[in-house]
Amino acid sequence: MSILIKPIITEKATADSETFNRYTFKVAVGANKVEIKKAVEAAYGVSVEKVRTMVYPVTRTQKFTKKGVVSGMVGQYKKAIVQLSDGEAIDFYNNI
């Protein structure tokens, strides 16, 4: 099981990384903060100061359309905000 699934690159996450040196990742639901810290340090070669995590629950939606009731679901996922030491940085765009 891979702990880091993908980095989250949104306007808010990019501004957070430029201003406060914090990067956001979508991670495995069963991963804890220590595992996330080790995975980021191994993958990107940086030193991590702090890890914040949040779990988003399953969201179910229903729409009433001409064809009847349409149901949808977004699965559960976990997001981690990783703060790096001063002078460290992660470049997500170097392989493009």
Image (tube, rainbow, N blue to C red):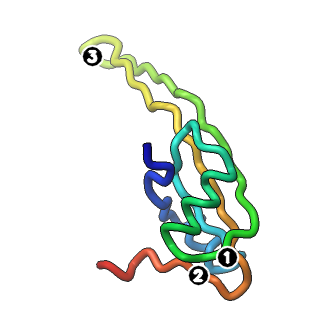
Which corner quadrant of the image does residue 65 belong to?
A: top left
Question: Is 50 drawn above or below residue 66 in the view shown?
Answer: below
- For mark 3, give the secondary structure: loop
Give the side of residue 2 with respect to residue 24, left or right: left
Residue type pointed to by label 1: Asn
Residue 24 picture location, percent across and down: 58, 61
Q: Given this view, does label 1 or label 2 mark the residue nearer the observer?
A: 2
Is mark 1 in CB contact (under 8 Å) with mark 3?
A: no
In this picture, residue 26 sits left or right of residue 48:
left
Disc 3 target residue: 66
Give percent across and percent down for residue 21: 67, 76
Looking at the rendered structure, the number of numbered marks drawn on it comes to 3
Q: Amino acid at mark 2?
A: Ala
In the rendered structure, are the residues bearing label 1 and label 2 in contact, judged by CB atoms less than 8 Å apart?
yes
Residue 82 is tagged as none
Which amino acid is tagged 3?
Answer: Lys
- Compare marks 1 and 3 and give the one earlier in the sequence: 1
**Mark 2 vs mark 3, CA separation in Å:** 51 Å
Q: In the visual, does 2 lie left or right of 89?
A: left
Q: Nearer the viewer, mark 2 or mark 3?
A: 2
Residue at the spot 69% in from the left edge and 79% down from the top edge: 19
SS state under label 2: loop
Q: CA distance from mark 1 to mark 2?
A: 7 Å
Residue that mark 2 sits on: 89
Name the mark nearer the viewer: 1 or 3.
Answer: 1
Chain-order first, disc 2 or disc 3: 3
Mark identifier at residue 21:
1
Q: Residue furthest top?
A: 68
Residue shown at 39% from the left, 78% from the top: 93
User: Which structural element holds mark 1?
Assistant: loop
Number of residues whose C-alpha sits closer than 10 Å to that of mark 3, classed few (under 14), some (14–19) or many (20 or more) = few
Q: Residues within 10 Å of mark 1 (few under 14, many from 20)?
A: some
